[in-house]
Image (cartoon, rainbow, N blue to C red):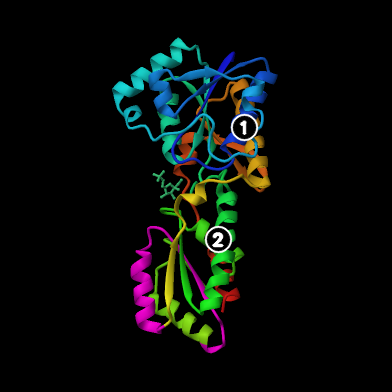
Amino acid sequence: MKTIGILTSGGDAPGMNAAIRAVVRTGIFNKMKVMAVKQGYNGLINGDIDEMNLSSVADIIHRGGTIIRTARSEEFMTEKGLKKALNVIDVFGIDGLIILGGDGSFRGAQTLNERGIACVGIPCTIDNDMGYTDYTIGFFTAVETVVDAISKIRDTSASHGRANIIEVMGRRCGDIALYSGMAGGAESIIVPEEELDVDKVCKRLIQGRNRGKLHSIIILAEGVGNAYELSKSIEEKTDIETRVTILGHIQRGGTPTAFDRIVASRMGFKAVELLMEGKSGVAVGIKENKIYSIPLEEALNVEKAFDEKMFDIARVLSI
Ligand code: F6P
C-alpha cells in the first residue's frame, strides 16, 4: 500500500479533524502518500484531491467540522458517478480509502469495496445510531453542547416558572436525547424508541409543580413529533406556560471533547493499520473501550440497540 485517500462524507461531526490528523500522520509515519479527497464522494467524482503533509493537519485536533469538507453526494449513487469515481481513484493511484461518516457513507464504501477498492470506514456522526459500535465520533461532543444549553435554559425556566421543551437531533435514534437528558436532569425524555404519552409527560409536570418545582425541562428527539404542537398541548392540559428551543445545527459544531478526540485518534491509527495489513471492506468500531474492526456489511446490519435500562434510570431519577 503506497497511497491512501481519506474522505469525510454526510453530516459532519466534531472529532472528524482529529481522525483526519491521525490518518495523515500514521500514513506518513509509515512512508505512505496520503491524499485528501475534498467534499466527500463528490471529490472522488471531480478529482478534487490534494496530497497532505504533516503540517496540513497541524492545529486541527481541537477544531470542529472537517477541514477536507463534506457532502451528501447524489451523483455517487448513480452508476455514471461511481464509474467516474473509480476512474479518478485509478488516475490518482489511490490504493486504499479511509471513509469517515455514518451509515450512508459506509454504504458508499461498501459499493467501492465491491468494485475492488480497499476501503475502511470510521464511524462519525453525532447521532450515535450505528449498532456495531458503542460510540460514534462526535456523539459526546453533541451531548456536551446540549447539556450546556440545558443549564442555560434551566436558569430562565426557573425564573419564569415555565416548562421548556428542548428539541435535539437524532432522526431515528434517541441517544442524544437520552444521554443529555440524563446528564442535564431533564424531567422528561422523549425518544423515537419509546411511545410518546403526552398525558404522562403532563402528569409529571403537574406533580412537580405541586411539589414546588419551579421549572421543567423536556428533551424531545427530533422526528418524534412537532415541538410546537407538543408545547400547545402541554399548555392546554396543564396550564403551565411552555417554551420551545430547537437546538439544530449548533449540535454539530464546536470543539470536540477529549473523549471524541481520543477515540478519533485511536480509530484513525487503526484504519491505516488495517489497510497496511491488506484488510478491506471493514469498519472500525469501539466496544468496551477496545478498538476493533468488523466487515462493513456486518456493521451495516447490526441493529442499534436502545439502552432501556438507562432510560428507566433517567425516569426514576427525575420523579
Ligand atoms: O448528522 C446527523 C444529523 O445531525 C441528524 O440528526 C439530522 O437530522 C441531520 O443530520 C441533519 O443534517 P443536514 O441538515 O446536514 O442534512
Residue 183 or residue 108, whichever sits in front: 183
- Which residue is the site of mark 1? 268
Judged left or right of residue 225, residue 15 is: right
Which amino acid type is marked by label 2?
A: Ala
Q: Is 73 rendered above or below residue 88?
A: below
Alpha carbon distance from label 1 to label 2: 30 Å
Q: Which span is picked out in magenta?
A: 210-239
Which residue sits furthest right?
29
Residue 178 is inside the magenta segment: no
Residue 255 or residue 122, whichever sits in front: 255
User: How many numbered marks does the figure carry?
Assistant: 2
Q: Position of residue 3 (x, y in %)?
A: 56, 15
Work out whether residue 197 can be spotted.
yes
Is ligand 1 less than 8 Å from the beta carbon at label 1? no
Q: Residue at x 53, y 40 (%)?
A: 124
Q: Position of residue 209 (x, y in %)?
A: 51, 85
Q: Is 265 rendered above or below residue 79?
A: below
Quarter occupied by the N terminus:
top right
Quarter occupied by the C terminus:
bottom right
Q: Residue at x 59, y 30 (%)?
A: 20
Q: Earlier in the sequence, mark 1 or mark 2?
A: 2
Q: Quadrant of residue 300?
A: top left
Residue at disc 2, secondary structure: helix
- Which residue is the site of mark 2? 149
Q: Position of residue 260 (x, y in %)?
A: 63, 44
Q: Position of residue 264 (x, y in %)?
A: 62, 38
Mark whose residue sits in front, 1 or 2:
2
Which amino acid type is marked by label 1?
A: Gly
Q: Quadrant of residue 290?
A: top right
Q: Residue at x 61, y 44 (%)?
A: 255
Residue at disc 1, secondary structure: helix
Q: Residue at x 42, y 27 (%)?
A: 41
